Amino acid sequence: MPIEAVTVFCGAKPGLAEQHLRAAGELGRTLARAGLDVVYGGASVGLMGPLADEALSAGGRVVGVIPESLHAHEGATHPRLTELHVVSDMHRRKAVMADLGDAFVALPGGLGTVEEFFEVLTWSHLGLHGKPCVLLDSGGYYRHLHAFLSDAVREGFVTAGTARRLVVCRRVDEVLAALGHPRAHTVVTERG
């Protein structure tokens, strides 16, 4: 199945390292220039803002999915989205984001980011989808998560096959190749 839209999970806070904001913007720009739609949480805050801003600036389509409770907050929803889905709650948000994306990428983030990403990874393990699950490990942010998965495999709680379903990219320029995109080596990710 060709990938046309990528669901991105990322922090609603910017974090302390500037490199994560840069990675979010670069990912948005890279996906847009490759002709891929960006599906994400619909907000303008945290890493979500630069992801959407750069994808839109590069001429891409950006689809936001936000629950009513967050949409009601002044300034929470990104004002320039191509398409916006306002849904009843967080459970519905995750279901819609999963349906709209042909692949999943996680940038750095907190509990929600990890929970959303691990849910789609679990669904892959259960055979509910065969979509790529990519972890963008900006600046080694997810190094402890790698250690956890290695320990879980070693302790027999996670199979090695399930652990291999998770593709780890250290740089944005590796993501298109991880998704099997035909333009992986021709898309320029730098500004200019």
Image (tube, rainbow, N blue to C red):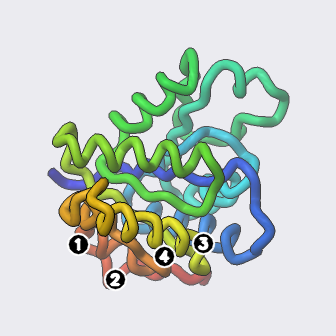
Q: Position of residue 157 (x, y in %)?
A: 30, 54
Q: In this figure, which residue is indicated by the disc labeled 3?
A: 141
Q: Residue at x 51, y 40 (%)?
A: 63
**Circles 1 and 3: CB atoms closer than 8 Å:** no
Q: Nearer the viewer, mark 1 or mark 3?
A: 3
Q: Residue at x 82, y 35 (%)?
A: 75
Q: In this figure, which residue is indicated by the disc labeled 1?
A: 182
Q: Quadrant of the C terminus?
A: bottom right
- Mark 1 is surrounded, within 10 Å at the Cα level, by few (under 14), some (14 to 19) or many (20 or more) other residues, namely few
Q: Earlier in the sequence, mark 1 or mark 4?
A: 4
Question: Label 1's element?
Answer: loop
Quarter of image, res 139: bottom right
Nearer to the camera, 82 or 24:
24
Q: CA distance from mark 1 to mark 3?
A: 28 Å
Q: Earlier in the sequence, mark 4 or mark 3?
A: 3
What amino acid is labelled 2 in the image? Thr
Q: Position of residue 61 (x, y in %)?
A: 48, 48
Residue 186's tag is: 2
- Mark 2 is surrounded, within 10 Å at the Cα level, by few (under 14), some (14 to 19) or many (20 or more) other residues, namely few
Q: In this figure, which residue is indicated by the disc labeled 4?
A: 172
**Residue 48 shown left or right of residue 157 in the figure:** right
Q: CA distance from mark 4 to mark 3?
A: 14 Å
What amino acid is labelled 4 in the image? Val
Q: Earlier in the sequence, mark 2 or mark 3?
A: 3
**Circles 1 and 4: CB atoms closer than 8 Å:** no
Q: Nearer the viewer, mark 4 or mark 3?
A: 3
Q: Position of residue 175 (x, y in %)?
A: 39, 72
